[in-house]
Amino acid sequence: MTSELGSVPPPSGAEQPCITVAFIHTSLVTRLALDVLPTDSVSDLKTKMTACHLTTFPSHGEIVVHSLKFKHRRQLYCLSDSMLMSCFVNRRGRDLLLFAEVSVTEEHLQRPAPLIHGQASHGGGQ
């Protein structure tokens, strides 16, 4: 038997993992929504973000996630890489809103910009 989304439900009595969605705003003014398991660490989430960002925003190139921040009582707090997401998932019971300090990798910054069709080259006197 499958659900509306096409996934197979777990056998009777099996515990379902508590999956939470993390809505992430980045310093590159991009936004992602990622599934987060309570067993994921902040480091795991950063790895997921890097892969998802490259797939979703290929024109930005590969990114480096410097920090993930969580807003609590009007203040942003940096999350340590070793912290488990269960600290948030189990206590909050709702989606997470996070901010990520990211940068584009040096390799992407050094690539020349692609020419746009019809754009003239300004290199020689023709």
Image: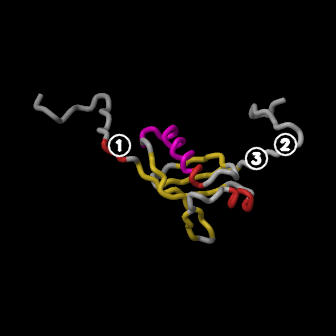
The verdict on residue 55 being magenta is yes
The image shows residue 28 at horizontal and vertical percentages of 45, 52
Q: Is residue 91 left or right of residue 83?
A: right
In primary-sequence order, the first of circles 2 and 1 is: 2
Which residue is label 1 attached to?
107
Q: Quadrant of the C terminus?
A: top left
The tag on residue 17 is 3
Rendering quarter of residue 121? top left
Which label sits on residue 20? none
The kind of residue on which mark 3 rests is Pro
Q: Is residue 81 magenta?
A: no
Residue 92 position within the rendered picture, expressed as x and y whole percent measured from the top left: 72, 61
Q: CA distance from mark 3 to mark 1?
A: 38 Å
Residue at 45 percent of width and 47 percent of height:
63
Taking depth in this image into account, of 118 and 66 the one nearest to the observer is 66
The stretch of residues the image draws in magenta is 46-60
Compare marks 3 and 1 and give the one earlier in the sequence. Answer: 3
At x 31%, y 39%, the residue is 111
Q: Position of residue 20 (x, y in %)?
A: 70, 50
Up/down of 34 relative to 67, above or below? above
Cα distance between the residues tagged 2 and 1 = 46 Å
Q: Identify the secondary structure beneath mark 2.
A: loop
